[in-house]
Amino acid sequence: MNDNQLDDLLNAPLIAVADNGFSARVTARARRQRLREQVPFLVAVLICAAVVLPFVPLRQITAAIAPLLTGMPASLAIAALVLTFTAERALTQR
């Protein structure tokens, strides 16, 4: 057997195994458990944000960021947003 035949065998889709919904139930249970584990963290973040937000100087922050954004080419700003969202997605999938 040569490498191409082995690659073909390894890349061929497997036949479906009837499990009467077992894998779907396990996946659903794992998702629910993960959500239950994340809820306390999300609640803590929201509480901290609610406590800190009144003390954040939003006008000064906006005034400091505005010149950077207006002087930046639109394509660079879009690329920065895409990279930010991509990095956030990659970190959440870890």
Image: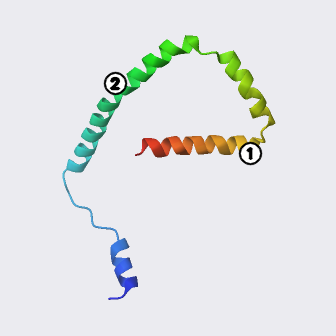
Q: Amino acid at mark 1?
A: Ser
Q: Which residue is mark 1?
A: 75
| Residue 40, numbered circle | 2
Q: Is residue 21 left or right of residue 66?
A: left
Q: Quadrant of the N terminus?
A: bottom left
Q: Is residue 17 above or below residue 43?
A: below
Q: Is residue 79 left or right of residue 71?
A: left
Please name the residue shown 27% across and 35% down the image: 33
Q: Is residue 21 above or below residue 2?
A: above
Assess disc 2: are there few (<14), some (14-19) or many (≥20) residues with their C-alpha within 10 Å of its C-alpha.
few
How far apart are the alpha carbons under marks 2 and 1? 38 Å
Which amino acid is tagged 2? Pro
Q: Residue at x 36, y 84 (%)?
A: 5
- Residue 18 in the image: x percent, y percent? 20, 57
Vertical arrangement, residue 2 with respect to residue 45, above or below: below
Residue 24 place in picture, x, y as percent = 26, 46
| Tag 2 near tag 1, CB within 8 Å | no
Q: Residue at x 29, y 67 (%)?
A: 14
Looking at the image, residue 37 sits to the left or right of residue 52; the answer is left
